[in-house]
Image: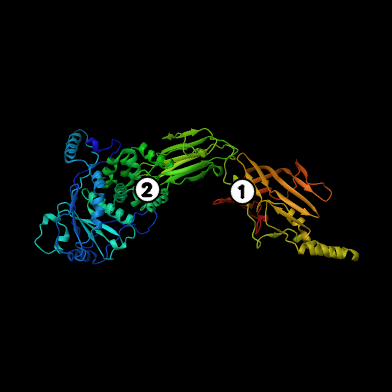
Amino acid sequence: MKSKLSPSFRLGQTSWKCFYTTAIAGLIGLMMAIPAAQAVCTTSSRGGTPPGAWEAHMNEIASMGTFPEASFEIGNQKIYRMRKPDDVGSRDRWLERLRSMKPRIEELQRHFPTAAEREAAEREESERRERDDDYRLPYMPTPPERSVLIIESELNIIDNPAFTNCAAEEEVHDLKNYLSGDLDPNLFKGLCVVFIRSHVFDREEERKFALSHEWMHTMQHGSYQISEMERLWWIEGSAEWGAHKVVGRTTERDNKIEQFFERQPDCSLTQQSYDAQVFFFWGEQSFGTDWGISLGMGGPDYLDTPRRAAEILPPEQWLDWAISQADKKITMPDGRDLPFQAELELLDLTHSCEAAIEGPPLSVQLREIRFPEDSAPLLTIDPQGAQVAYRPLDVDEPSRPSSWTRVTEEVELEPSEGPLLLAAIMPSGNNLNVQIQQESSAGDNCACHIGRWMEEATADSEARDSLRGALEAIEKARAFVPPEQLAELEKAKRMISSSDTKDRFRFRGAAEQIFELGGEGDVTYVNDGPIVTFRGGGAFSIEDPHTIRADKTEVNYTTYIHSGRWDIEGGALKIDLQEFTYKGTVEGPVSDGPQHIGGSNRHTSYVGGGGDWIVSCEGSGVKLTPADRGNRGPGKDAVLEAH
């Protein structure tokens, strides 16, 4: 018995023997096709069968003639074939495909427990239950012995390219009622009919995978009723895994592997279906083929909820499942790399002193944790009952990852020099809620505005005219200007009126408006907007390198930085500009080439940007609104985007 079970596989059963009800009109069994798109975490329902579908399919089979002799066997499963009269005698490619799969299918069947092993297991269960009422024997799937009828259907009533319908174990399949002649009822007891709509397949790879997938369902029918198979999450996933074992080197289901990783952050494992094949890929790698057969071909029906499905593995092995995804170590059954992998979600603690990693039960959550550049507070991780592990994120050597540290209770971590990779999973019926917190007594080590940003330009419709007051002053001064100076006054007015004097930035000086008045000069900035940086610990800077060209003179500021401190007081962000630093070159008509300039002073040349602001973090950006309500209005806010 032990040769058929993995010691780490902890399934239980209330009764090892299941009985089936006969498939009747209106019930078409398990279907292989990709389910229709539904809500992200809703296991697809196959829905109701169209009226008359069952009878139409039965009549289609009846038109093919009498029930034939068995063609051959796969293990203890007899194979029957019925075809349209016009096709009888021609080459049967579907039987050829099945014959070619026979060795690999039989290899899988050898991993089912033998009759002797099942009897020994039942005796052990009986003895152990006398001493321990709570003892549950790891589940022993029923060896596949169902006879299988292969049918090519030309009907288009059902969209699925292939589907399987089986009678209950000791009951006669409904097909007998549609066939003429005095047929032995024993031929139809527990019969499985595999319907293949061969006209909808385009590629040989599709045909082989569909056939092998449906054959897995005939093997599962030793342990389940049709109604159970339609709702149990592991049925389709294990059928996909088994089909990969039989066909190999196929890319036919890459889309379902991609879907698994797309859905996983928001969905419990028990809400997956075909996608759950990835879980079986990992399970076989970790525990062997016996494990996949035990769960996929005989897992008890109570595992359909997260609370009970958590019993499949001990908690620490659920974490192994999460770590394998983080390290990208899961492979296809044939050893190839997965076509898609789990993606890391960024958790940037630069913007918050605390965060939570949340998710449904039995859902792997992967995070890249980043810290403020200029501070290194202690980090507290509280798993809240989850299984958690972390390691340094090896950017330079991803092929040689660092060792994982497992966390089962609240821990404090010393500051990390770089990002951390964290894997978490809740092996129970509860939602995941890992709490992460940075020590920050002063409140300046983490806040949502901390980071490096570029200010976005204010839209022209809202930008204020920075020299509108100058035009008003000119008009007021006209009455006091001597007649001989009115021409100069008009010239100044024309220069201002003809220039773009709109103030589009809160953190950029007025150099552009001043030097471009009347087309007398030109200012070119390196960046589309000033670079504003709030560092952990309270440091602040504005970088805005630019070049000024005017009157045959060019000044190139390669460094143009205003810096100071920030703090939070009374709910407002207070910015205190303290220093101006610049470096660059200047070149004019008599300068003999570019001359280097540079320096710093405590008297900043910058007007604006300082003062008090109200912070609003929105998505990946930050909006700063003047704290003084009198200074608010269109064009007064600073909008910062990550840079």
Do we see residue 504 in this rendering?
yes
The image shows residue 263 at horizontal and vertical percentages of 40, 51
The residue carrying mark 1 is 453
- Front residue of 206/602: it is 206
The quarter of the displayed image where residue 466 is located: bottom right
For label 1, count other residues whose C-alpha is less than 10 Å away and answer few (under 14), some (14-19) or many (20+).
many
Q: CA distance from mark 1 to mark 2?
A: 36 Å
- Mark 1 falls on what kind of element? strand
- In the rendered image, the vertical position of residue 310 relative to residue 217, given as above or below: above
Q: Residue furthest left?
A: 182
Q: Is residue 224 left or right of residue 533?
A: left
What amino acid is at disc 2? Ser
Residue at disc 2, secondary structure: loop
Where residue 46 appears, x then y in whole percent? 30, 58
- Is residue 134 something one can see in this rendering? no
Residue type, mark 1 in image: Trp
Q: Which residue occupies 75% across, 47% down?
A: 605
Residue at the spot of label 2: 268
Check the picture and name the quadrant holding the N terminus: top left
